[in-house]
Amino acid sequence: MNKILEPEITFINEQLKGKNIDKIDRRLKDLKDIFFDKDALSNMDNDTIVYEVESYLPVKQNTEGGLFYGITYIHPGVVGNEYFMTKGHFHKIKNRGEFYSTLQGEGMLILMDEERNTWAEKMFPGSMHYIQANIAHRTANTGDTILSFSAFWPSDAGHDYATISEHGFSKILIKKDNKPVLADR
């Protein structure tokens, strides 16, 4: 084969472009179960965008041996003293890992094992994060600008959002004295 092909996707002007790009946004009304301070949440505009995700899905979901790629953009903001964050999930196939690479902004990758031990890693431009198998994960924007990061995960991993929706993480990331702190729920 002597063909020279163009790439199927590109990342230009901070956007994924190409075929098989899936785009979603999550608004406060979609995230009512993840924030601890329900009073603060009830006083906010339900249509406020918390984060957006662009994903490149070159194979069908649940394809063993396939990979997906995505970029998440978390807007700055707080609900009470909790930073804007993603829903968080385990993988449905729990023995699947994932990689994150921070593109811009500041944030925290919040991790929790199956025994509910919770810890966080700082995210900043150029930081790389390996999320081991059997670990729940979510990200929070701790800065004043959009936090964006790319992710690579197995196409058969799936997302178990229900466990986190029902039980939450054992700790929450709050803004205290203008700094991020992991606190008990």
Image (tube, rainbow, N blue to C red):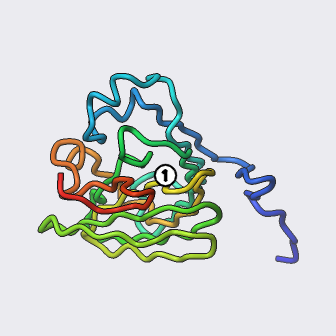
Q: Residue furthest front?
A: 177
Q: Secondary structure at mark 1?
A: loop
Q: Residue at x 39, y 56 (%)?
A: 62
Residue type at numbered disc 1: Lys
Foreground residue among 180 and 172: 180
143 sits left or right of 18 in the view: left
**Residue 7 location in percent, x, y?**
78, 63
Q: Residues within 10 Å of mark 1 (few under 14, many from 20)?
A: few
* Residue 40 versus residue 126 in the image, above or below: above
Q: Residue at x 54, y 38 (%)?
A: 24
Foreground residue among 53 and 43: 43
* Residue 126 versus residue 64 in the image, above or below: below
Foreground residue among 148 and 21: 148
Q: Residue at x 24, y 59 (%)?
A: 183
136 sits left or right of 47 in the view: left
Q: Residue at x 35, y 54 (%)?
A: 158
**Residue 169 location in percent, x, y?**
22, 55
Residue receiving disc 1: 60
116 sits left or right of 178 in the view: left
Foreground residue among 129 and 46: 46
Which corner quadrant holds the N terminus?
bottom right
**Residue 99 location in percent, x, y?**
48, 72
Numbered-mark total: 1
**Residue 143 location in percent, x, y?**
55, 56
